Image (spheres, grey):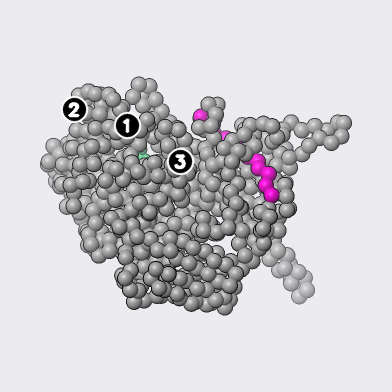
Amino acid sequence: MKLTKTIFSLLILLCCLLSNTFAQEILVNVHGRKTQSLNGKWDAIIDQYDQGRKNKIYLNKKPVGKTDFYEYSFDAGLKLNVPSDWNSQLPELKYYEGTVWYAKHFDVPKDHIGRLFIYFAAVSYRCKVYLNGKEIAEHEGGFTPFQVEVTDLVKKTDNFLVLEVNNTRTTDAIPAKSFDWWNYGGITRDVMLVSTPKVYIHDYFIQLDKHRNNQINAVVKIAGSQVNVAVTVELPELKIKQKLVTDQRGIARASISNVKQLQRWSPESPKLYNVRISTAEDMINEMIGFRNLAVKGTGIYLNDKPVFLKSISFHEEIPQRKGRAFSEADAVMLLSEAKALGCNMIRLAHYPQNEYTVRAAEKMGFLLWEETPIWQGIDFENQETRKKAGTMIKEMVMRDKNRCALSFWGMANETQPSKARNEFLKYLIKCTKEIDSTRLITAAFDLVKFDRNRQCFVMDDPFIKELDVVAINKYMGWYHPWPVTPDKAIWDVARNQPLIISEFGAEALYGKTGDADTASSWSEDYQAQLYKDNLEMFKHIPNLRGISPWVLFDFRSPFRFHPTYQDGWNRKGLVSDQGFRKKAWYIIADYYKNIN
Ligand code: GCU
């Protein structure tokens, strides 16, 4: 009996230790907590042949005797900006795929008491985290946050934090081996120390009830599953002060009904309320909006009124800087161009974008579609890949579930029908709904074909019945010549569901004029005419509830070889890589201005 107990205790200890080397469930709303930024210039070592880990360079050893020496040093070497991709920081790193080591010394904040975490808003694509010479975490996925508790691992001063970052593409990754955007690598988003009390507010989900316009549902989770903790949820502007108590799992729930004078969030009136969640030891504030979103028949309803989605897509990239977007200023630049275009929605392609963009979009009045990079060829047969995809989508939903602007969770982009794909995507829907069952589930397909017998566009993929909204990418006039004139282009696709055109468009080199009927002119005139033709076709899609032209800005892609017209850029932007609006921009601006 004694032996069994010992083994059991050792197993528990092992699980606790192991759990520390893997990133923990993320802290919600770090921006509302006590933080200290670790952004800035970090020391870096380019490790092209992956020698660093076996040489344990994260120990940062210094020669002491007459005979020892080390063939590395983090001091006085390369320095890289954090946050930022590495590709845009050095010409030699433009195409680099491999490992880069980052290192940073830091002191624990002087007034720190309680628990301490290091929070990474994103590291692309995979990384291991070492602190004071020990591996403490690892993470895979270039677009979602993770953190690791370091309360018992830090010294008061001169802690040595090292990240081993790798962006090599692999067939079991998400995205997989090839994708139509730049493979930026690096610590691409903020890094910060987060201080919390010993018993802290770990997570909360506060939103308007899916089916009622005057009931706010609140769920608050206290770290360490602390039982009987008194929690208060306040919305001062609505004179709400709700008392809750945590249950056996450390979770407190409340449905606050008959809320008076609630102004529901909408793109036209993006009202946010200050929400304060507090316990005896902790308090956190967040601006949260409240809205109702539903599908009824083929309609999409926002706050009980039918809505037409005037969307646009953009990648997380500042073209003028040839680098990943990562700051609030970057977010405002991208979103301001979408606002000028007259959009009420953004499809954040093709991966969870940084939190500044999501929060700024909500403040500026954009509905949002977010997705993980389940883009075309994913290894749907691979159980490990499926597990990774589940973790990734949960990290995305956990981070943004309190953003009322978030309306669509995208499950995939242009995947091909198969049993394995269907099972994989159903698993992702399950993972999503475990956290949030209130938003609309969608996915983008490129499976619409022209049926010559019926003389109409059709699609055959039974998987669409798993979705609330069906999204179609269709490049009529670009990848597909017109089989009929646009005014005769009738659609019979997903007829009983709302349908969004989630991508359409064509490439044009800004300033290139040419024949409006010749694709290989790569001209703005051809792109503009194609937009006019597609808008004509859209009139003949009876269940069309929104469009999202591909794409707001020209963006970088290794897919795009043409030396004159592309030169490593996908030129489908309505705005050039230098920030100039093409003729097609004005066609969409006019369409959005005049559509109801
Ligand atoms: C696809 C894909 C995009 C890509 C676009 C294109 O539809 O979803 O990521 O950039 O086509 O070919 O430009």
Q: Pick the residue in front: 307 or 454.
A: 307
Q: Amino acid at mark 2?
A: Asp
Residue that appears at 33% across and 61% down: 265
Ligand 1, what quadrant? top left
In front of the other: label 2 or label 1? Answer: 1
Q: Which residue is mark 1?
A: 580
Look at mark 2 in the image and give the residue it sits on. Answer: 517
Q: Earlier in the sequence, mark 3 or mark 2?
A: 3
Q: Which mark is residue 391?
A: none
User: Is the C-beta separation of discs 1 and 3 under 8 Å?
Assistant: no
Q: Quadrant of the N terminus?
A: bottom right
Query: Would you say 371 lies left or right of 549 here?
Result: right
Residue tagged by mark 3? 325
Q: Earlier in the sequence, mark 2 or mark 1?
A: 2
Is residue 531 rendered to the left or right of residue 323? left
Q: Looking at the image, which residue sits at the far right?
A: 66
Which element type, helix, strand or loop, lies under badge 1?
Answer: loop
| Residue at mark 1 to residue at mark 3: CA–CA distance | 18 Å
Residue 455 as seen in the image, left or right of residue 241: left
In the rendered image, the vertical position of residue 10 relative to residue 242, given as above or below: above
The question of residue 310 being in magenta is answered with: no
Q: Is mark 2 within 8 Å of ligand 1?
A: no
Residue type at mark 3 is Ala
Magenta segment boundaries in residue numbering = 94-107
